[in-house]
Amino acid sequence: MSANLTYRPLDNIGVNGLNTQANPAALDASWLTDATNVVLRETGRISFRKGLKQNVLSNTFGASSAALPIGAVAENKGDDAILAAIGGNMYTVDFTTPSTPWTSSFSTGASSSDWQMISFKNETYCVQSGAAPVEYDNGTWSLLSTSTGYNAPAGVTTFDPSCGMGYYGRLWVGGITEEKDVIYYSDTLNAHKWSSGAAGTIDLKTVWGSDEIVAIAPFYGQLVIFGKRNIVIYQGVTDPNTMSLVEVIRGIGCASRDTVQAVGDDLLFLSNTGLRSLSRTTELDKVPLVDYSVNIKDTIIRNTGQDVNSKAIYIENEGVYVLIFPNINVTYAFDMKHLTPNKVPRVTKWSFNGTKIPSSFAYTESKGLLIGQEAGSIATYEGYYDKNYVSAGVYTNVSYTVNFKTIWIDLGQSVIASLLKKMIAVFEGGSGLTIGVQWYKDFGTIPSKSSTFSLNPVSSGISYLFGSATALYGTAKYAPYYSLKEYSVPLSGSAKYFQLEVTTETNGQVASLQDMTLLFKQGKIR
């Protein structure tokens, strides 16, 4: 007698995102072992990341006429101007003339464009290690040292801070070459005065011992100072004369200045041991540290060692913290809207084609997320192609690969191999997309078989889940559905453990996997 057909529903497939830390044979199907260029929708369904659409023509300022990366990008609050750092120069960006966008060129005298652009009093102040600070004041660029009324901090030969923030009524900076463990703060509401009025310093030598300042950030009325190996928190910072030390967190610091991002009532940053957060709580006197990257811990620690120039941005309208290692083209998206069972964000991984790799980020009021690119352009996050700007109104669409792989699925027959018969998947949307499916058996690293099918969802008219409009289980009982369609993919071979990999190239359409079921029969003992 033929064995009965068995089915294995995978209705929660991938809902918890990427997990490279645990044994893939010990995880359930809610985890993925690869999740490239995907996001997880609110319902947990696997879908595509959006594309990077260039808004302006790439710069060609290099000696070889090759485009230079956008080292920093920001929006000045005073005049809503978009600012960009390219090579040793600063520019304002005119999006109304995308073929000639780079205007108001200003030479900074710096050899790098790795600036931190700080908003303060509707102006923008730019700092980076080993360079003189730069000021943008509503249409005018200048070195801070040439500004009216400027005076440098007392006893400092070269004022070249590497990081800063504009908050609590003054500009705060740190990491100057001469005193890497001293915070300098300006006079109240005056970023030109550093040795008069209410200006002053905080010397951390007696606070954390030997360390150097990497980043500074506000945190619910407190001042957080990140070192390489320590974190210092002060309270009462609206009056530096009376502010007091709250806590020194030893042994954990910030690996990269531009990974510090405010996310709701939390503060995220990359440390040498993974993505961390300072969790705000009213119940504890001390600020607890949370590791948000436990599901990819070893991998992200390795990435941090490979690239010291990591950057991050929080995409507010998506609820996603994006962390990129541009030198190795590795990007992680941490979904802050939903947590996994171990109380951390769901993670997926993004990749970009060559020079389209992001080199800087800014979240702006006028244009949303802006991405400075290695290709020398500034992109927005939209659509489902990576788009290159060619000329007025003309773009080149560039597909990107979407890929995800399941954990090893135990087919539940113990020593008995299962005969693979069919995969049934329900997709939403994705008209015209070709989906590639390949599967692996019993912990093998080479796929046994592969197959393809095309998505052709219903795009017009009415389609009923059960019967027709006049059937018993038609309009009276069930509402119509659109864009959802069930696809059947034949499988072959036998296995005790099964792993599935799905791949597609984007075509401008978005698709999401809603549900999956495996069908198999009992085979032979082996």
Image (spheres, rainbow, N blue to C red):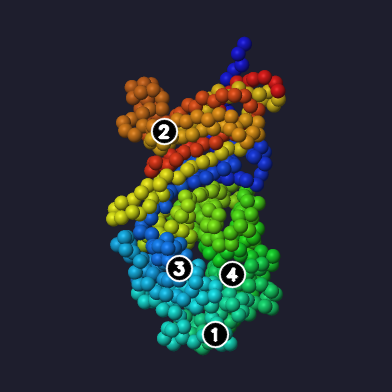
Q: Earlier in the sequence, mark 4 or mark 1?
A: 1
Q: Nearer the viewer, residue 216 or 464?
A: 216
Report, in whole angstroms, how far the alpha carbon at label 2 lies from the one at label 1: 64 Å
Q: Secondary structure at mark 2?
A: loop
Report, in whole angstroms, how far the alpha carbon at label 2 lies from the one at label 3: 45 Å
Q: Residue at x 65, y 77 (%)?
A: 204
Report, in whole angstroms, how far the alpha carbon at label 4 lies from the one at label 3: 22 Å
Three-letter residue code for mark 2: Leu
Give coordinates of residue 475: x percent, y percent. 35, 27
Three-letter residue code for mark 4: Val
Category of crowding for the residue at label 2, using alpha-carbon neighbours closer than 10 angstroms: few (below 14), some (14–19), many (at least 20)? many
Q: Quadrant of residue 8?
A: top right
Report, in whole angstroms, how far the alpha carbon at label 2 lies from the one at label 4: 49 Å
Report, in whole angstroms, how far the alpha carbon at label 3 lies from the one at label 1: 28 Å
Q: Residue at x 66, y 68 (%)?
A: 230
Q: Nearer the viewer, mark 4 or mark 3?
A: 3
Q: Residue at x 43, y 39 (%)?
A: 511
Q: Which residue is mark 1?
A: 153
Q: Which residue is mark 4?
A: 214
Category of crowding for the residue at label 1, using alpha-carbon neighbours closer than 10 angstroms: few (below 14), some (14–19), many (at least 20)? some
Q: Nearer the viewer, residue 94 or 235?
A: 94
**Farthest residue, direction front:** 64
Three-letter residue code for mark 3: Gly
* Image side of residue 385 versus residue 13, left or right: left
Q: Earlier in the sequence, mark 3 or mark 1?
A: 3
Give coordinates of residue 75: x percent, y percent. 40, 67
Category of crowding for the residue at label 4, using alpha-carbon neighbours closer than 10 angstroms: few (below 14), some (14–19), many (at least 20)? many
Q: Earlier in the sequence, mark 2 or mark 1?
A: 1
Q: Residue at x 38, y 55 (%)?
A: 54
Q: Which residue is mark 3?
A: 87
